[in-house]
Amino acid sequence: MSNAVAQVGPVESSFLGKPLVHAVLGGTFSVGELPLIKAWAEGLGKTIKDASGGKNRSVCVIIDFSSLESYEDPKVIEMLVGLMENDLPYIYRTATWGANLRTQMAEQVVRVMAKRDNIKDFKTKEEALAWLRE
């Protein structure tokens, strides 16, 4: 049985005048969980677009990676790059927190491949939120 967790929400309607979208990825993602991560990426993308109201750079995102253990299929990276490319117009900043070293390295790859300079990882949720508030 899989221990993969993929959640989108809640959305805080006003975070310094911008919606703040919360998301979580946790556990281990094997080949069998590819549909789950695909649905998560699509759901997060839709939530971001809806929260933006069509306004550029209008949404902040915080993603909890604190319980993310690993992924076993490179398609996970492809899906995350696609998400980051598609939501770029709407994102002011994306902060992730709690990632292990392997996840941090994967995040660097995603960031470069998606040409995103407005995403950063942190050890704690508090540090992530502080950066989003800057």
Image (cartoon, rainbow, N blue to C red):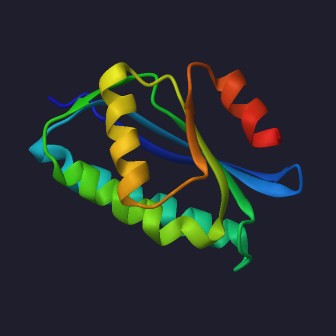
In which quadrant of the rendered image does the N terminus lie? top left
Check the image and name the residue furthest to the right: 17
Q: Is residue 116 above or below residue 12?
A: below
In front: 133, or 40?
133
Q: x and y percent of residue 22 in the render?
A: 61, 44
In front: 56, or 63?
56
Q: Is residue 3 above or below residue 95?
A: above
- Residue at 19%, 31% in the rendered image: 2
Whether residue 62 can be seen here: no
Q: x and y percent of residue 110 in the render?
A: 37, 50
Q: x and y percent of residue 77 in the render?
A: 27, 50
Q: Is residue 9 left or right of residue 39?
A: right
Q: Is residue 121 left or right of residue 58?
A: left
Q: Is residue 99 left or right of residue 12?
A: left
- Residue at 89%, 56% in the rendered image: 17
Whether residue 41 can be seen here: yes
- Residue at 70%, 24% in the rendered image: 127
Q: Could you tell me how many numbered marks the image carries?
A: 0
Check the image and name the residue furthest to the bottom: 54
Q: x and y percent of residue 58 in the render?
A: 75, 65
In front: 28, or 132?
132
- Residue 51 position by quadrant: bottom right
In which quadrant of the rendered image does the C terminus lie? top right
- Residue at 18%, 54% in the rendered image: 75
Q: Is residue 70 left or right of residue 45?
A: left
Q: Is residue 26 above or below residue 132?
A: above
